[in-house]
Image (spheres, helix red, strand yellow):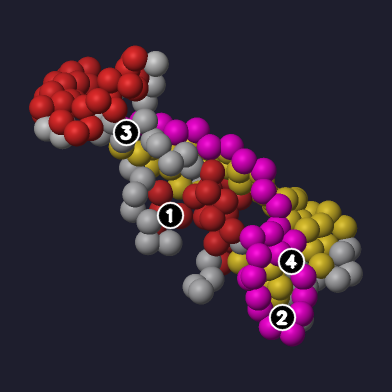
């Protein structure tokens, strides 16, 4: 995995306690996503706050992510801003070799002195973006919505004409109840 210097935290010199890192200055935006070969977004702007609690045998990382992405609407294909806000947690333990077997626990080799948090920031944003990316229906392009309704009506009429007569009685049962 490629390391991204501006998101790498050198924890070897830190004493036990809580430390805060503000990645707002590093601009988690469209260029950040391109580091992960993700060109799905028109634009993005996020603020990431990280609280790192260093303990003797592990570190607790608490991410607070807030921002928005600009994507094409799934319905009308016009650009739409999607708000994303999340709180995520990561436990970093030290072991013999690196291991990422669970979603919340990462094991780093004991010889490791720094951690690149960029893959975790990327993953946390990705999992909190809604599957359906669309405007409110009133904000969608009205011409596109009108065309979609026309197509939908034509498809519905075609399907009604193609119904197998053996199944027609079942449709009657469905509409009667």
| Residue 148 shown left or right of residue 121 in the figure | left
* Residue 92 - label: 4
Q: Quadrant of the C terminus?
A: top left
| Residue 140 in picture, x, y percent from top left | 29, 22
Whether residue 53 is in magenta: the answer is no
Q: Which residue is mark 1?
A: 33
Q: Are marks 2 and 3 in contact (CB under 8 Å)?
A: no
Residue 153 is drawn in which quadrant?
Answer: top left
* Residue closer to the observer: 41 or 27: 41
Name the residue rendered at 53%, 49% in the picture. Answer: 127
**Magenta stretch secondary structure, dominant:** strand
Is residue 83 in view?
yes
- The residues bearing labels 2 and 3 have C-alpha atoms spaced at a distance of 43 Å
| Residue 104 shown left or right of residue 74 in the figure | right
Relative to 112, does residue 93 appear above or below in the rendering?
above
Q: Which residues are magenta?
A: 79-105
Label 4 crowd bin: few (<14), some (14–19), many (20+), radius 10 Å: some
| Residue 157 in picture, x, y percent from top left | 13, 23
| Residue 115 shown left or right of residue 54 in the figure | left
Q: Which residue is mark 2?
A: 109
């Amino acid at each position: 995995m490629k390391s991204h210097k501006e998101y790498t935290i050198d924890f070897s010199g830190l004493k036990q306690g809580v430390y805060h890192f503000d990645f707002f200055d590093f601009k988690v935006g469209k260029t950040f996503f391109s580091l992960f070969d993700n060109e799905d977004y028109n634009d993005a702007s996020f603020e990431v706050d990280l609280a790192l609690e260093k303990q003797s045998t592990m570190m607790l990382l608490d991410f607070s992510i807030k921002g928005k992405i600009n994507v094409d609407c799934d319905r009308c294909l016009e650009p739409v801003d999607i708000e994303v806000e999340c709180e995520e947690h990561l436990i970093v333990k030290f072991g013999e070799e690196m291991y990422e077997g669970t979603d919340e626990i990462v094991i780093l080799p004991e010889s490791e002195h720094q951690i690149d948090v960029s893959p975790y920031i990327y993953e946390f944003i990705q999992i909190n973006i809604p599957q359906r990316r669309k405007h409110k229906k009133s904000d969608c392009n009205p011409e596109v919505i009108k065309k979609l309704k026309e197509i939908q009506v034509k498809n519905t009429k075609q399907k009604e004409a193609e119904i197998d007569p053996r199944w027609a009685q079942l449709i009657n049962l469905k509409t009667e109840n």
